[in-house]
Amino acid sequence: MSIFLDKMEAKIEFFEAYELNTLEKKINEQIDNNKALMLSVFFISHNVVFNPLKNKMLYSAVVHFKVIG
């Protein structure tokens, strides 16, 4: 059995929610989790679309975490 301990250099995560404050909470929780991996936010992209099936706005975000420093 082999164990490899490679350092993670970058990570991209996707988030979505029907309420903006819920999306923000999810992103903030993951920012705290990724601090343990020594990853910081490098770039955030967000989008909003209307979901006609639920008659609500759907908020989404892509967060690029990267080792900085």
Image (spheres, rainbow, N blue to C red):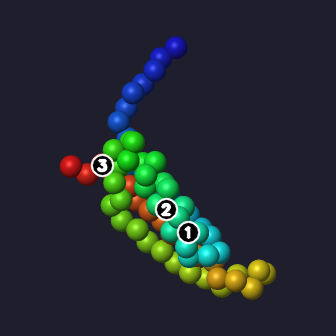
Query: What type is the residue that disc 1 sits on?
Result: Leu
Q: Looking at the rendering, which quadrant does residue 56 occupy?
A: bottom right
Is residue 69 in sight in this rendering?
Answer: yes
Question: Three-letter amino acid code at disc 2?
Answer: Ile
Which amino acid type is shown beneath numbered disc 3? Val
Residue 15 position, x and y percent, is: 56, 64
Near mark 2 (Cα within 10 A), the count class, few <14, some 14-19 or many ≥20, is some
Q: Residue furthest left?
A: 69
Relative placement, left or right, of 3 versus 69 is: right
Dot label at residue 67? 3
Disc assigned to residue 69: none
Q: How many residues crowd mark 3 within 10 Å: few (<14), some (14–19), many (20+)?
A: some
Mark yes or no: residue 9 visible: no
Q: Nearer the viewer, mark 3 or mark 2?
A: 2
Q: Position of residue 9 (x, y in %)?
A: 34, 45
Residue displayed at 43% across by 72% down? 45
User: Helix or strand or loop: what does disc 1 sit on?
Assistant: helix
Label whose residue precedes the other's in the sequence (3 or 2): 2
> What residue is drawn where x is 55% and y is 73%?
21
Please state if 4 lies on the left or on the right of 40 as rendered.
Answer: right
Q: Which mark is residue 23?
A: 1
Q: Tell me the crowding category of disc 1: few under 14, some 14 to 19, or many 20 or more residues within 10 angstroms, Cα based.
A: some
Q: Is residue 10 above or below residue 45?
A: above
Whole-number angstrom distance, CA of label 2 to CA of label 1: 6 Å
User: Where does the image place residue 38, in percent across and percent down from the top left?
Assistant: 33, 44
SS at badge 2: helix
Asked if the residue at tag 1 contacts the one at tag 2, i.e. Cβ–Cβ closer than 8 Å, the answer is yes
The residue positioned farthest toward the right in the image shown: 53
Q: CA distance from mark 1 to mark 3?
A: 23 Å
Please give the residue where the numbered disc 2 appears in the rendered image.
27
